[in-house]
Image (cartoon, grey):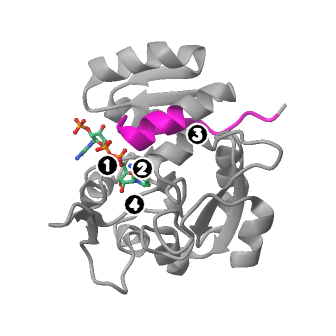
Amino acid sequence: MKTKSKVAIIGLGKIGQAVAANLAKSNRTFIAADRNVAKAKELAAKWGASAQPGDIATAVKEADILILSIPFGAIGDFLQQNATALEGKIIVDPSNPIAPDEKGGFKKIIDAEKSAGQINATFLPKNAKLAKALGTLGAGSLATAAYQKPEEATLFYATDDKTIDSQIEELIADNGFAAVRVGGLNQSIRLEVFGDLHEFGALGKTVTASEAKAKI
Ligand SMILES: NC(=O)c1ccc[n+]([C@@H]2O[C@H](COP(=O)([O-])OP(=O)(O)OC[C@H]3O[C@@H](n4cnc5c(N)ncnc54)[C@H](OP(=O)(O)O)[C@@H]3O)[C@@H](O)[C@H]2O)c1
């Protein structure tokens, strides 16, 4: 059996924890990393043998695929600060460029026509590959719609590098979802909050792969 790429989840907040629980359900091993290592250890105990708790520096060094489940505003700095260790690695970006507004909702914090995916791509370390993925559902649906039956729910993804499609699709499958490729990173805006393929955008709900294919 082919060995799967080593995954690390960086940042164990709402999205990081949902992804970790999904991967544990698939018995996919992963490094659970947080800047608070005690928190990583405590959570990893809950996820069982699949989870290896660790600090961020170790995760960056050991993993092939890094899921950056940290705020959009922290990703550029993270990529630049870890540029050498991240050379040639796969970076998964679920981020949404949003912040709370004054009305109890959210507002976009970059220009309307720009996307977090394309901005984050400008900070990519040498030979690293970026996939916009694991971000098209809210954390609630990422947990509750995983492993849905009879037809799985969809997670859309986009990347400029087709050589990583199979690894991203395997990662999405190991989260209990059907992967649907939308295109290159110039499609990122569609996968972010307010986009037409986001749960909190025009899509408005989870969709199955057959429904999803009609939308792209
Ligand atoms: N929540 C959603 O429904 C949802 C849906 C789709 C995509 N996303 C995206 O997923 C990402 C994570 O969102 P979330 O809701 O999971 O956020 P969250 O619950 O606030 O968790 C964020 C995590 O990132 C860590 N963090 C913050 N700044 C950091 C830094 N500079 N370096 C390292 N770690 C840092 C936090 O650590 P501390 O606890 O120490 O601050 C926390 O563990 C965001 O980019 C968000 O836009 C969220």
Image position of 169 with respect to 45: above or below:
below
Residue depicted at x 32% and y 32%:
34
Mark 1–mark 4 CB contact (< 8 Å): yes
Q: Mark 1 points at which residue?
A: 82
| Disc 2 from disc 1: Cα separation | 6 Å
Q: Position of residue 30 (x, y in %)?
A: 55, 30
Q: Name the residue under label 3.
A: 144
Q: Mark 2 points at which residue?
A: 86
Mark 4–mark 2 CB contact (< 8 Å): yes
Residue 38 part of the magenta-drawn span: no
Mark 2–mark 1 CB contact (< 8 Å): yes
Residue 182 in view, yes or no: yes
Secondary-structure class at tag 1 = loop
Sequence-first tag of 3 and 4: 4
Mark 3–mark 4 CB contact (< 8 Å): no
- Magenta-drawn segment: 2-20
- Left or right of 150 on screen, residue 56: left
- Left or right of 54 on screen, residue 62: right
